[in-house]
Image: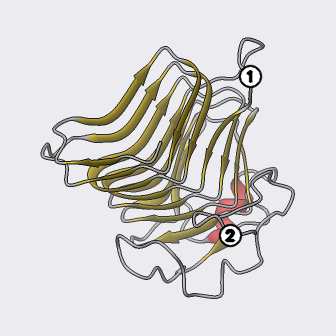
Amino acid sequence: SGNTFSEQYYYGIYMYYGIDVTIDENHLSNFRNNFAYGVYPYQVNGLKVTKNHVSDVNYGIWAYYTSTTAAASFTSEISNNMLDAGNYGLTVYYGDSVNVYHNSVIGSSYGLRDYYNGLSVDIRNNIIQGGTYPLYSYYSSASRDYNLYYGLGSSLGYIYSGSANYPSDLPSLQAIDSNKDQNSLSGDPIFVSSSDLHTTGVLAHNNGDVSASVSVDFDGETR
């Protein structure tokens, strides 16, 4: 909590086989390896990653086998992070019972990588920009809604669940699965800069789902 990590080589924070782990309000930047990871929790049961600012890295947050079981004291949550990554901004990989709320993400390749997640992974109220795809979803059952997607390429996403889909706009994304992203938006969030992911645009303003259980924002201000 509250650390500054600079000029790490391969991992900023690497947490392996933990229970009830909190990683919050850290600043990570200036990584020296072209394939570095900012925050890499692996098989953590009860994980809270919040209010971290990660930049100048290949993979922002890579959450691998995150879960919440009876052994954990709280529900796993990835929230209020600002991630500017050279490849994948935010990866949630084989998740079970994880809330992914209110993250602002830039990935030069993929913004959000939603990979083999269970239905209990809840992805809401995120602002996601991707150079190739803002959304990359592969065999995922995660609940996804109220997100703002902005793609710099020709496709808004890559969705694979037995066959590949490349939705070019929001209606085509929503048509793939009527249970996902029906209240999501598409367009430029207008970030202050590539490293300062506060928004100055109107698209994200007051368009989130207020039932998501994160009552303050990245700056500690009441939502």
Instruction: Say what secondary structure mark 1 lies in.
Output: loop
**Residue bearing the label numbered 2:** 221
> Which percent across, then down, holds residue 165?
55, 51
Q: Earlier in the sequence, mark 1 or mark 2?
A: 1
Please, is residue 205 above or below residue 32 in the view?
A: below
| Label 2, residues with CA under 10 Å away: few <14, some 14-19, many ≥20 | few
Locate the C terminus and report the quarter of the image it occupies: bottom right
Kindly identify the amino acid type of the residue bearing the numbered disc 2: Glu
Q: Nearer the viewer, residue 110 or 212?
A: 212
> Which percent across, then down, holds residue 5?
28, 46
> On the picture, is 206 further left or further right than 221?
right
Residue placed at 46% from the left, 79% from the top?
191
Q: Residue furthest left?
A: 32
Residue placed at 52% from the left, 55% from the top?
81
> Which percent across, then down, holds residue 21?
56, 27
> On the picture, is 148 further left or further right than 214?
left
The label shown at residue 73 is 1
The label shown at residue 86 is none
Residue 74 can be seen in this image: yes
> Which percent across, then down, holds residue 86?
27, 56
